[in-house]
């Protein structure tokens, strides 16, 4: 029997603001712009929205009740669903899940899900590099006494365990960076579009935190990204082909990621595919959350594209880049395109299923698997998007 | 010590004060749950295994192994500018708890997971001592 949520809703609007070193806008302003772009893409008016879910990025800082602030900024009236959500990079897929659940339950009809951030500051006049590292270089209390700073280091410690336990190598990590850069070279919207990357370039790039080179780490971007979700009936009248939400699930493992060396995909994959009535073999396009190259290897393993621990050799076979047998992170991902937390893989999933991928469009694009991952393999969400509702 | 110490000093929070007080006496202590006996670090008000709120600070051997490590190449604090690249290590103590620390007497390139280590104490200011670790012979 078909799950009642499967294919009940669809993404009908996608709004992506300019991404990267874009200055002169606030996080709130980027969010407004993204929602407006998504509404225009869907052929809808702001009055059509009756739900608003917001994932505030770092630069929202202590602005409380963000979704209400966004509602007021946009003059939205009579919403029936509103929430400010934060599961880190798993939020994007989770927002879409909550939107779909509310719509399917009759509590709302048309919901915008939005992420925005503006952690980058303009270059200083004296030409000093404005490091993105400062934005994510959290000082963590007493650990600072030992020089332990930032998310890069937190992930590096887990990646080192994976290398130790499974034999993952620097070349394996580099293969992910190179494959995604090749996709980005096909995508004019990607921040690294015009910059080719070879494995030799990767090895020559500066270290950030070993085992991570510069190109193991995602970009940091200013910008906003929104999608509009609505019910199946209304989706048929949308301006663009609906991207149906066929399967969804979350999985949050808890404990120490250094022990599990797994993402929550191990929990979320089975219920998501069961809901969708699909299997891994049906997936045409894979859009995985990629804060680091390492995250991609682990997530490939945890969805079952290769046995546990073999994500490295799998990537090194050059199967995930353009022309490979498994299209992974086809826009270049967060490593090479832009970093809107989990909204980056969601947006590329929508683009591919619609067939709007231009030079990077995959030949077959009926089903896209999208993942979100937050913290250090701490939170996880899965979406299965499809061209047909069933 | 002639030159001023320029790295960040640990703030003695309520939870962690006993750890730093013991370090000043060159003793390594971690919390031990009174409910289930598990050693844990850093300090917490609640045991995530048995949910007991009762814990004591227990001396530990100071012996352990390198569980993981990351080599820092970026300067996040000026106090570390002269040290990059340096390693942040996670030590797994014989008693089970894991500590973030640094290795002394071991070049970055010689660090390996599983390497046996033992605690040493660095008196970095008259008030503050940092427990660190050095390689030890495997017994």
Image (cartoon, coloured by chain):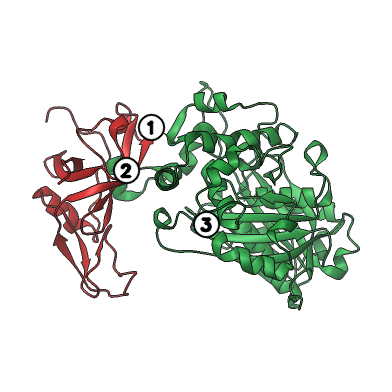
Q: Assess disc 1: are there few (<14), some (14-19) or many (≥20) residues with their C-alpha within 10 Å of its C-alpha.
A: some
Splitting the image into 4 quarters, where does residue A383 fall? bottom right
Whole-percent x, y for residue A263 in the image = 52, 57
- Residue at image point 56% right, 40% down: A218
**Of circles 1 and 3, which is in front?**
3
Whole-percent x, y for residue A324 in the image = 71, 40
**Of circles 2 and 3, which is in front?**
2
- A139 up-or-down from A124: above or below: below
- Residue at image point 53% right, 55% down: A374
Residue lying at the far top of the rendered structure: A126
Nearer to the camera, A335 or A284: A284
Q: Which residue is mark 2?
A: B113
Horizontally, is B54 left or right of A6 in the view?
left
Q: Are marks 2 and 1 on the same chain?
A: yes
Instruction: Work out how far the residue at label 2 is from the one at label 1, CA to CA, in angstroms.
Output: 24 Å
Q: Secondary structure at mark 2?
A: loop
Q: Which residue is mark 3?
A: A263
The red one among the chains is B
Nearer to the camera, A308 or A110: A308
Splitting the image into 4 quarters, where does residue A356 fall? top right
Q: Which mark is residue B75?
A: 1
Q: Secondary structure at mark 1?
A: loop
Nearer to the camera, A126 or B78: B78
Chain A shade in the render: green
Whole-percent x, y for residue B110 in the image = 28, 32
């Amino acid at each position: 029997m078909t799950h009642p949520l499967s294919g009940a809703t669809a993404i009908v609007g996608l709004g992506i603001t300019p991404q990267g070193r874009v200055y002169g806008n606030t996080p709130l302003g980027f969010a407004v712009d993204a929602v407006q772009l998504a509404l225009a893409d869907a052929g809808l008016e702001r009055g059509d929205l009756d739900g608003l879910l917001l994932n505030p990025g770092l630069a929202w800082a202590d602005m409380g009740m963000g979704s209400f602030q966004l509602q007021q900024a946009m003059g939205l009236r009579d919403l029936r669903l509103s929430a400010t959500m934060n599961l880190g990079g798993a939020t994007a897929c989770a927002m879409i899940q909550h939107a779909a659940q509310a719509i399917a339950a009759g509590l709302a009809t048309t919901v915008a899900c939005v992420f925005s951030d503006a952690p980058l500051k303009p270059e200083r006049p004296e030409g000093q590099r404005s490091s993105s590292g400062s934005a994510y270089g959290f000082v963590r209390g007493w650990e600072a006494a030992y020089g332990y700073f930032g998310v890069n280091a937190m992930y590096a410690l887990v990646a080192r365990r994976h290398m130790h336990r499974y034999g993952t190598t620097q070349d394996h990590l580099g293969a992910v960076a190179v494959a995604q850069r090749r996709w980005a070279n096909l995508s004019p919207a990607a921040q690294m579009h015009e910059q080719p990357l070879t494995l030799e370039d990767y090895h020559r790039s500066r270290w950030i935190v070993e085992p991570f080179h510069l190109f193991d780490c995602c970009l940091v971007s200013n910008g906003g990204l929104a999608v509009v979700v609505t019910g199946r009936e209304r989706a048929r009248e949308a301006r663009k082909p609906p991207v149906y939400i066929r399967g969804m699930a979350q999985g949050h493992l808890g404990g120490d990621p250094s022990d599990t060396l797994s993402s929550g995909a191990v929990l979320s994959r089975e219920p998501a595919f069961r809901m969708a009535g699909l299997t891994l073999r049906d997936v045409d396009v894979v859009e995985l959350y990629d804060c680091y190259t390492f995250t991609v290897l682990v997530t490939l393993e945890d969805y079952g594209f290769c046995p546990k621990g073999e994500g490295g050799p799998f990537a090194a076979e050059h199967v995930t880049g353009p022309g490979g047998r498994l299209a992974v992170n086809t826009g270049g991902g967060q490593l090479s395109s832009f970093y809107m937390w989990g909204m980056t893989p969601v947006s590329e999933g929508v683009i591919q299923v619609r067939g709007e991928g231009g030079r990077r469009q995959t030949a077959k694009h009926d089903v896209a698997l999208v993942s979100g991952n937050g913290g250090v393999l701490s939170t996880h969400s899965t979406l299965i998007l499809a061209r047909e509702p069933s | 010590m002639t030159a001023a110490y320029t790295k960040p000093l640990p703030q003695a929070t309520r939870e962690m004060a006993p750890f730093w007080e013991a370090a000043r006496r060159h003793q390594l202590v971690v919390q031990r749950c009174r409910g289930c006996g598990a050693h844990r670090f850093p300090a917490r008000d609640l045991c995530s295994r048995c949910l007991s709120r009762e814990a004591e600070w227990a001396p530990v051997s100071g012996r352990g192994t390198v569980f993981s490590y990351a080599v820092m190449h970026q300067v996040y604090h000026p106090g570390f500018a002269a040290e990059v690249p340096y390693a942040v290590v996670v030590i797994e103590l014989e008693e089970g708890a894991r500590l973030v620390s640094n290795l002394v007497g071991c070049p970055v390139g010689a660090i390996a997971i599983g390497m046996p280590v033992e605690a040493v104490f660095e008196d970095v200011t008259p008030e503050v001592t940092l427990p660190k670790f050095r390689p030890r012979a495997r017994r």
